[in-house]
Amino acid sequence: MKKVLLSFLLLQSTAIFSQSKLNEQVRNYRKANEYALLNEFKGLLSIPNVVYDTVGIQKTASFIVKMMEDRGIKTTLLDAKTKGVPPAIYGEVLVPNATKTVIFYAHYDGQPVNPNQWAEGIAPFKSVFLDASLEKGGKIIPDPQPTDTINPEWRIYGRSASDDKAGVFSILSAYQVLNKLEIKPTVNLKFFFEGEEEAGSTHLSEILEKHKDKLKSDLWIICDGPVHQSGKKQIVFGVRGDIGMEIKVFASKRPLHSGHYGNWAPNPANLLVKLLASMKDDNGKVLIKGFYDDVVPFTDLEKKALAKVPAVDDQMKQELGFVRPEGGGKTLAELINLPSLNINGISSANVGKMVANVIPTSATAALDLRLVLGNDAQRQAQKVIDHIKSQGYYVTQNESITDEERLKYPLIARVILGKGYNAQRTKMDLPIAQNVIKAVQTTVSDEVVLMPSLGGSLPLFLFEKYLGTPTITVPIANHDNNQHAENENIRIQNIWNGIETYVALMRL
């Protein structure tokens, strides 16, 4: 028995020493090549990649293909059945004697931008370095030169700096490091970079179904989203689903003078805010009938993991500048694992210098429904529609409202649904999931945060539906990266940490 225990301890210590040596090698390589790495990343950031910009998407894809080919990765483009859809960029590295195959996913498209909303001196596709975040008084600094010492606390600002070109870059740089160090991965590697994620991955199912033989694997590892707000690395085993909807409330056929018709003609803005207010209570709980009914509860293992998530609520209230959160006392970690209803935007007439004394003809709100395991996107949206009807509204999906409808129904709402997708969650006790945890843990001394589900949404249920393969998300971006908004950024140390993390994952 003593000999068996001694052998086990020797094997364990050898593995720890080997991993420690690998971490040191990766770090030394990175330190010697920081300028070249960041220069390539800036080149990637300089290409416009708004999801609806066909030319920019094609240029971005071409740049990534060259990055992969320069690293010796066999690369091809995977098309959808629908013509003109942004292709997925696919690459593979087959490793002799490997028994497992892992596909690494990130997306190369980005959210739309309004350059006028970005800070002075910062443009979406002219990435710049700052010596700290804007919120902490960061100032623009010159691009580093080959002989400069690069401060890991510097930030790079630009669209998709964090979401998700940093993911593409970290994955490919991790393979580059292994290649340069002549260290073989221990699993077959496949790479899959999507070009339509920010449009809801509308044609991802077509790509997965059409190329399912090529996409066979034991696991998808997703590089998207932020590390935990505490700064610790985190592994996420699920994501929320999502469906958007637009509600437009109608009143008079033409704008009316607020003096001549005020107190008499219905105001659609007032009607809409009253309708929206009926959907949630003062603590943010959704009041729509059945909204929480079909939620799949956490397993005991998931509950234990959630209980160990570092508390960041006080930190985030201070950082974001508000004193009373929603949730009735529940933590942020608990609340992002519940279905939610959010007002993304609301519009009626004008404000500011364009304001006029009118009663507008309509008011519009864009809603965002986040879904958890058990929710169905269409069923959840229907609950909202049923609630609107319960408030006395006639609901239609037609673009225009007829005179007959206007004179028949006192309350009229047009509801348009987006294309949604459901939530996904991978079991934390799967052997391959435990291997992922061990791999990421080897790169840090702090305990890695294990999150049953991310607050954000990705269409990961499609990988299970069409390929029967589990997914695990290992994000790298800083939590204050402003993704989807103006002044998006990535902290340089998060890039370096990401490379180390993905090297370890390629050595599962």
Image: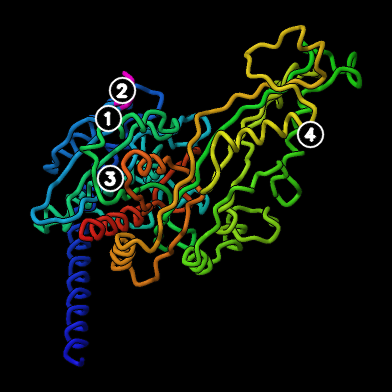
Q: Earlier in the sequence, mark 2 or mark 1?
A: 2
Residue 274, labelled with which disc?
A: 4
Nearer the observer: mark 2 or 3; the answer is 2
Residue 336 image point, x, y percent? 56, 52
Nearer the observer: mark 1 or 4; the answer is 1
In the displayed structure, does residue 151 sit left or right of residue 328? left
Residue 210, labelled with which disc?
A: 1
For this orientation, the residue located farthest to the bottom is 2
In the displayed structure, does residue 154 sit left or right of residue 219? right
Q: CA distance from mark 3 to mark 4?
A: 46 Å
Q: Residue at coordinates 41% horizontally, 29% vertically from top-left?
A: 202
Q: Determine if the magenta segment contains residue 104.
A: no
Q: Is residue 148 visible?
A: yes
Q: Secondary structure at mark 2?
A: loop
Nearer the observer: mark 2 or 4; the answer is 2
Q: Is residue 353 visible?
A: no
- Depth check: give the residue in front, 69 or 349: 69
Q: Are the residues flagged by discs 2 and 1 in contact, CB closer than 8 Å? A: yes
Q: CA distance from mark 1 to mark 4?
A: 47 Å
Query: Which residue position is annotated with label 2?
Result: 81
Amino acid residing under circle 1: Lys
Q: Secondary structure at mark 3?
A: helix
Q: Residue at coordinates 89% horizontally, 15% vertically from top-left?
A: 261
Nearer the observer: mark 3 or 4; the answer is 4
